[in-house]
Image (cartoon, coloured by chain):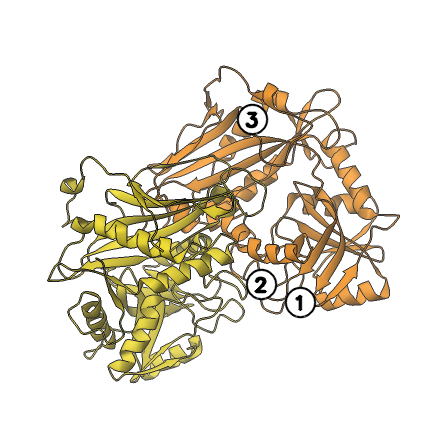
Chain colours: A orange, B yellow
Amino acid sequence: MPTKITIQKIEKSHISEVDFNNLPFGEVFTDYMFECDYKNGAWQVPKIVPYHNISLAPSAKVFHYGQACFEGMKAYRDNQDKIWLFRPDENQKRINKSLKRLAMPEFPANYFMEGLTTLVNLEKDWIKQGEGNSLYLRPFAIATEAGVSASPANEYKFMIICSPAKAYFSGEVRVRIADKYSRSANGGTGFAKAAGNYAGQFYPQELAHKEGLQQVIWTDASTHQNIEEAGAMNVFFRINDTLYTAPTSDRILDGVTRKSLIDLAKLMGYKVEVRYVTVNELIACAKDGSLKEIFGAGTAAVISPVLGFSYKDEAYETPLPDNSYALKLKKHLTDIQTNKAEDPFGWRVLVE
Amino acid sequence: MPTKITIQKIEKSHISEVDFNNLPFGEVFTDYMFECDYKNGAWQVPKIVPYHNISLAPSAKVFHYGQACFEGMKAYRDNQDKIWLFRPDENQKRINKSLKRLAMPEFPANYFMEGLTTLVNLEKDWIKQGEGNSLYLRPFAIATEAGVSASPANEYKFMIICSPAKAYFSGEVRVRIADKYSRSANGGTGFAKAAGNYAGQFYPQELAHKEGLQQVIWTDASTHQNIEEAGAMNVFFRINDTLYTAPTSDRILDGVTRKSLIDLAKLMGYKVEVRYVTVNELIACAKDGSLKEIFGAGTAAVISPVLGFSYKDEAYETPLPDNSYALKLKKHLTDIQTNKAEDPFGWRVLVE
């Protein structure tokens, strides 16, 4: 059943004012946004409107009780000027898992997919050819109802905003492995892209920054031994010739890049084991030389090599090896995403 | 050093439109709000302005990364028409702990206290005499900076909004003791009044509601044996003639009502022990009759007797006993708050 998305046209695009050679991540937004309100127990007719500020009561529940979650996705332009999305069904399903965990109403799949493709079509000019260029897409939902009683809201807003992006170079990444702070609890919201999960990570991240480290790798809150994820990225370890990444759980985000890399690595003939790597094991492998590389996996940077880690008072270096699996996987995955390589898994979706 | 708070006057109060006999909690707001912006590395001059909507970019960080925290307080009018706050310094210190944990800038103590008292003075007419009447005060702070990169914001807004409140009757409260879902992790944000802590509790609470239970009592995420708090309330158990409540930790909110009740109970000659009660112990005490009462403690309801609890498939009743400590403590504490009883601890603060 097609959705009747209403479109309110702008008079003139502001694209000519944007310097596409100088795009800080997530700061420039396109001309339009997708918007859909939930009220009276139902999602209303979705619309695409000029990008605009949102006006909310100071008592709106998102400000007090954190009912907010999001997705991160990208659209790519290939060398034949076709526009592609990457596994959008995964994001559509995942935001509904996040919404459910936060007692927010699930968003209809057809609204999500049609909203997304209609919006991307309208914003095609913002998607540039060339390596690393993309249109970053941010679907998100917030509780808009006014009132400070501590209960789920009855009114919500689902939006998609778009930001043109260059290749995301995070510079040299070294990480701290958490031994005190935690990202999530058993039975908590760690598997969801819940807004509150991120706020809780910023302070420990800032402590890491002060040590010259760029990220925190989180461990389980009970023992601080099992290595989980990096908050904005899932984490892979290569020990000898095998790649390891933690199993998903109610504490760990089921990352689309993570699961794609598991399949792709196997296709490329790499051994992959989905199991916890413990801190003690990691340190032992770093010392005996069997730890070959560490990398993060996520939508924004696709793959970020991690060149070293610190645990308590010790620092360990993990320089990029000559035969880096991370760089090969990154090239292969981005080639699939941008229609330069075959897509044996059917991950690409043409936007028409 | 006095703060120069600017005040923008309204033309006419809307107080005459408000039915003070019918006030749902947290839905009606007064004429003014306190507002202070953080930018360029500093909190700007605070102001009191007419209550108004907030306009934010859809990319504002509060919507995506949950940098938001709050406090809950009350102002009371006594029989001589004096206006009182209750331990406002505790809320002032605690919101700074919350802000710090969420990588938000701490708010100056003098801005908080002078903003609060100036606002309460301006809104005196909204505070009514009589048992249970109060002006509920909600200080809170949100990240307002636009941009979807996952890092702490550089711009924030601190606000105080006010809502006239009647005695908060939550009806009969029975609770589910958590055995699967969790509220917080070791090293997480449980001790902070972080917005995201609340969103994560709503879904398990809704599951409890479907069973006819009103709240969830949270247990530690590792063993689900140690009873922690109820999310919007701390929890006390009376076993024989001793009151027990869990120690504060990085998982448990250091509630102002909780700590006041510990002191007050001792003053009233009750035995109090601050230690964990385990689920097994609670069930054993419910079975052998030594569990006399359970109650929640928080600003909104002051004390809420809990008349029963469910754990897994079993339900236990804990009816209010004749000689209820909960009801005596509630009367004594509210008498101190409203200047009907002596204040041996110096908790009341006159608003002049």
Disc 2, SS = loop
Front residue of A319 and A349: A319
Q: Can you tell which of label 2 and label 1 is closer to the viewer?
A: 2
Mark with earlier residue (2, 1): 2
Left-right relation of B212 to A326: left
Farthest residue, direction right: A322
Disc 1, SS = loop
Q: Position of residue B163 (x, y in %)?
A: 25, 49
Say what amino acid the circle numbered 3 marks.
Thr
Front residue of B144 and B119: B119
Picture quadrant where residue B45 is located? top left
Q: Are marks 3 and 1 on the same chain?
A: yes
Q: Can you tell which of label 3 and label 1 is closer to the viewer?
A: 3
Q: Are marks 2 and 1 on the same chain?
A: yes
Chain bearing mark 1: A
Say what amino acid the circle numbered 2 marks.
Tyr
Q: Which residue is mark 1?
A: A225
Front residue of A204 and A120: A204
Say what amino acid the circle numbered 1 marks.
Gln
Mark with earlier residue (3, 1): 3
Could you tell me which residue is drawn at 77 percent across and 41 percent down? Answer: A330
Disc 3, SS = loop
Q: Which residue is mark 3?
A: A30
Q: Are marks 3 and 2 on the same chain?
A: yes
Give the answer, above or below, for where A285 lies relative to B11: below
In the rendered image, is residue A352 in sight?
A: no
The quadrant the C terminus of chain B occupies is bottom left
Pointer 2 and pointer 1: residues touching (CB < 8 Å)? no
Q: Which residue is mark 2?
A: A181
Chain bearing mark 3: A
**Separation of residues labelled 3 and 1 (CA atoms):** 43 Å
**Separation of residues labelled 3 and 2 (CA atoms):** 37 Å
